[in-house]
Amino acid sequence: MNPDVPPDIDQRDFCCERLFEVLMEGKLAFAYDRQIRELQVFNKGNQWVQRIDYCPFCGTKRPSSLASEWEARLEAYGNSKIFEDDSIIPEDLRSDVWWKKEGL
Ligand SMILES: [Zn+2]
């Protein structure tokens, strides 16, 4: 199991079985940030992170990142401390619930 991927990630959010398997095995440094819908590859030693826009196995374009939309919703929450204190981030925004609920 890959500790960088929540165990209850939905396989249907990925374009192919191979990508899902590699992600879940954790043999490569792939991660999925479901809050902002970003597939990422990263170097565990140097901690660089690169967003992946196309699946490296089948070439399908990934759904767009929702990083700016996520930040906009944090700002709309109206509490500037939200960027320093994760504990006040609303539950829906901590996972993929918010964008699935909005149909993004
Ligand atoms: Zn694929």
Image (tube, rainbow, N blue to C red):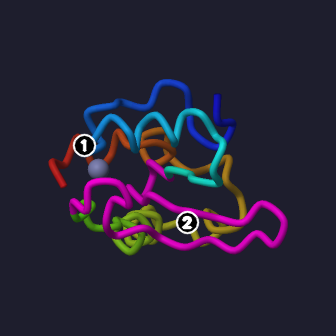
> Which residue shows up at 59% across the image and 33% down it?
25
Q: Nearer the viewer, residue 89 or 41?
A: 41
Q: In the rendering, at what x and y percent does residue 91 appear?
A: 49, 39
Q: Is mark 2 within 8 Å of ligand 1?
A: no
Q: In the rendering, at what x and y percent does residue 73 appear?
A: 38, 64
The residue identified by callout 1 is 100
Neighbourhood count class around disc 2 (C-alpha, 10 Å): few under 14, some 14–19, many 20 upward: few
Extreme-left residue of the structure: 103
Specify whether residue 19 is painted magenta.
no
Q: Amino acid at mark 1?
A: Lys
Give residue 81's mark: none
Q: Which of pointers 1 and 2 lies earlier in the amino acid sequence?
A: 2
Q: Quadrant of the C terminus?
A: bottom left
Q: Amino acid at mark 2?
A: Asn
* Magenta-drawn segment: 33-60
Q: Give the left or right position of residue 76, taking residue 88 as reference.
A: left
> Which residue shows up at 62% across the image and 50% down it?
88
> Which residue shows up at 38% across the image and 39% down it?
18
Q: Nearer the viewer, residue 103 or 57?
A: 57
Q: Give the left or right position of residue 62, taking residue 50 as reference.
A: left
Give residue 79's mark: 2
Q: Quadrant of the N terminus?
A: top right
Q: Secondary structure at mark 2?
A: loop
Displayed quadrant of residue 66? bottom left
Question: Mostly what secondary structure, the magenta segment?
Answer: loop
Q: In the rendering, at what x and y percent does residue 44 appear?
A: 77, 60
Q: Secondary structure at mark 1?
A: helix
